[in-house]
Amino acid sequence: MNKGNHYLKMLALIVAAGFIGLLVSCNDDDPDPDPDVTVSLEAVIDYSPSAPEEGEEVTLDASLSVDDAGVGFDVQWTITSAPENSTATIADPSATTTTFTPDIEGSYEIELEISNATEGVSDTETQTITVLPKGFEELSGAITTDLTLENIIEDPTQIDYLVTGNVTASAMLTIEPGVVIHFQENTMLTIDQAGSIKAEGTESDSIIFTSVNEGGGILWKGIFIGSGSSQNIIKYAKVMYAGNEAMNFTGDDFKAGIGVNSGGNIRVENSTLMFNDGYGLYVDENEGHINTFINNDVSDNIVGVGTWADEVDDLDNTTTFSNNSQAAVEIMASSFSETNEATWNVLADGASYNISGTINVNGTLTIAPGANFEMDEDVIINVYGAFIANGTDVSPINFTTSDDALGLLWKGIYVNSADGRNILNHVNISYAGNSIMNFSGADFSAGLGIDASGKISITNSTFSNNEGYGVYSEESGGQIATFEANTFSSNDVGVGVSANEADALDGATIFSNNQSAAVEIFGTTYEDSRTSTWKALNGSAAYRVTGNVDIDGALTIEPGVTMEFDEDVLVRVYGSLTAEGTASEHITFTTSNLNGGLYWKGIHIISSTTLNSFDYVDLSYAGQSAMNFSGADFAAGIGVDANGRVSVTNSSITECKNYGLYIEETGGQLEIFANNDFSNNLRGVGLRADEVDALDGNTTFSNNSFAEVEIFGSSLSDIKDVTWTALSGDAYYRVTGRLDINGVLTIAPGALFEFDEDVDVRVYGAFIADGTVDDIITFTSSNITGGLLWKGFHIISSDSRNSFDFTLVSHGGNSPINFSGDDFAANIGVDTNGQVSITNSTISNSGAYGVYSKGTTNNFTDISAGNTFTSNPNGNF
């Protein structure tokens, strides 16, 4: 032995021993292991080569396994599955790195178990290794001259070609039927602009493009089509286990089995696209093209097909889609060209299109019956051309969210085209309204939004679970061409329309569980060119009016209509309003928030047409604020302005803050008034003297706290010869200002009048108050308990018809009557030229005289006159 070498070895051992001692010393100072640290192992198998042939040694390596706590582990390799008759074994099953030699082509399942018995932990990993048979050819690099790949091995289960590096074809690449091509990890076949591909198998002898190791989860990159050649075709082929890495498209980059770049073109027929990570087929949104796509099977990809709007019509209705985890067909954000006129087919077996971005429809797009669309969050379809979605009863068209489980909403369909072909028939729109649409006026969210220049027909369709409106028609011009037999459920609002478009709605459409309203009518104008009817909605559904509505045209309200008005909302009638219900189908006008105690403003009649009519109408909870009349302003359920005219029959007006019905004191006209009910208003009816004769004796009044009927200070015109009827029950007229009787006024037996403080009646024409023994006429104070007196009657005219017979005149005489000479206070005052007859009457409780006469009277004090005078402090006469 060489002594020098011996000394060197001894020196090395001494140094090593010292170093080990130092390590031990350091370890003695280390803290004890943390008992809370979790010890775990993760087995990882690495092997090479990635595509071994039979008879080629394979190296197995466990060194990449994870041992975070550094506890160490033992190794055990096992072949758990191998091709039949294989006798392959692992050289050293317990070594971290070992080998085995596959003796038969096929799949070998290798199991690795790592364990630490002391810590009681272990983990197992399994890896499938595909072993190739001998005899295939390898491909890589550029193909610059026409090339045909022949079927080398007739057995369709055997590989013909192995792609070991990226292949780029700049010439014609022809692949014969039966060819099987395996691709190593992340390799790709590119057909560039100068090249073309003709891969046409047959029904019995298909072409296969797949991974070199399907079972091992190894993916290749895919087929990239950059060529626009019309010869490009993939037919009776299988493209599988691609998508290892994104392809470099002109637009965004994605993974795909087949990728068609900008300018590229491909026909895919009778082929299978499956087990691809990413898309089975992806068409770049920058002018990638599908020539034909027919009778394929697209399954178990992330997305079956990804394409853009102009290419969707190339997809057929026979291709099957199954188990594509995100979507069968994805339509990306894009525009359907103005020159395009095409149909998007229904996908087979109920498969859905997934629209992942905004679609602008500029051309003429038809949606086939039965088509299903799932829309990503906030995605919108904008219609600027023509949109024809004409489903059938058995094959409706569906637009909904791509994920209702997470509560995601899409944006909706926006129509800003007036094309007469626009239609939704047998269409279901749900879970839209994620954000507001940009309308010409105010912006709102909706399932379907019709802008000012838009027009569409909506029939036999369902709108459900939409945020905002099911359908919104823009208030300044959106048009609904036809609206029939639809269903609106669980939207915030079913339909929102302007006054001009409300007549498009039908009575068959069903509304249910729409949170704020079935139909909302915005504050808008019903134009003077319109003559139409607002129909009764189905069931108990109501119109909700959320802003002031001006009726300039001729509007009819159909029997059975219910209208609910928001706080202080007013209807102004400049044209005509005919609201005529029936005994069995009343029309209802009321508040939209009864529980909240909110009142609407009422209906203001400005026009003088006789078409203004309320028959069998129930109006309630109006009068939130005063209407702007020609004279003084008042709140009312129905207010008739100076030039207005209205008829009110068989109707109820209740719970109004002030007047139920107000006829403006300077000229409003009450045409017909019969068989109504006024209850729980502050004032039932308020009107001037010239209109009182329109009131009937059948209308009922109850609990109108200030007055059943108020007669304002006004004049009965000299052309009038009328009778003021007795109101029904114990209802009374309350006179709140001076009355000048210039015409001929007859008071019907049984009538009751109450006068406010110091109010008087001046008779310049004729005043005939002839009651009966059973129905006396009463004239008294409106506040006897408050001690208030009215002024009394001042008879100025010499008309011999002036008379009081079977009357009670009491609590007048508050202040002197303005006689020709001296003034005196009295219940009845007869001026110098006045004439009156008083019989069978009671004159009582005057503030001064019962009767004071300077004119001509009957001998009213004679017992034969039958009068009674009591409690008149200045004398009975």
Image (cartoon, rainbow, N blue to C red):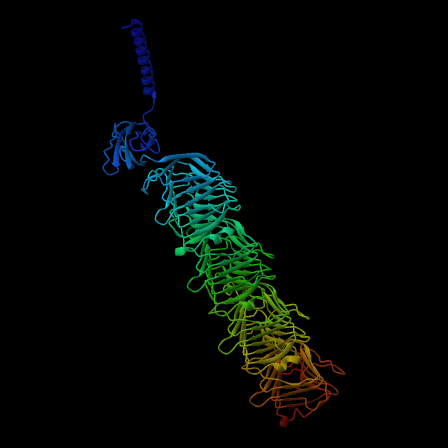
- Judging depth in this view, the residue of 746 and 371 nearest the camera is 371
Q: Quadrant of residue 621?
A: bottom right
**Residue under the image location 32 percent in, 25 percent down:** 32
- Residue 454 image offset from top left, x and y in percent: 58, 60
Residue at the top extreme?
Answer: 3
Screen quadrant of the N terminus: top left
Give the mark count: 0
**Residue under the image location 34 percent in, 31 percent down:** 49
- Judging depth in this view, the residue of 21 and 318 nearest the camera is 318
- Residue 838 image offset from top left, x and y in percent: 65, 89
**Residue under the image location 73 percent in, 80 percent down:** 818
- Residue 108 image offset from top left, x and y in percent: 28, 36
- Residue 678 visible to the viewer: no
- Residue 569 visible to the viewer: yes
Q: Using the image, determine if residue 382 lies above or below residue 665.
A: above
Residue at the right extreme?
Answer: 821
483 sits left or right of 112 in the view: right
Q: Using the image, determine if residue 132 lies above or below residue 292.
A: above
352 sits left or right of 499 in the view: left
- Judging depth in this view, the residue of 722 and 189 nearest the camera is 189
Screen quadrant of the C terminus: bottom right
Q: Using the image, determine if residue 558 lies above or below residue 426.
A: below
- Residue 576 image offset from top left, x and y in percent: 62, 73
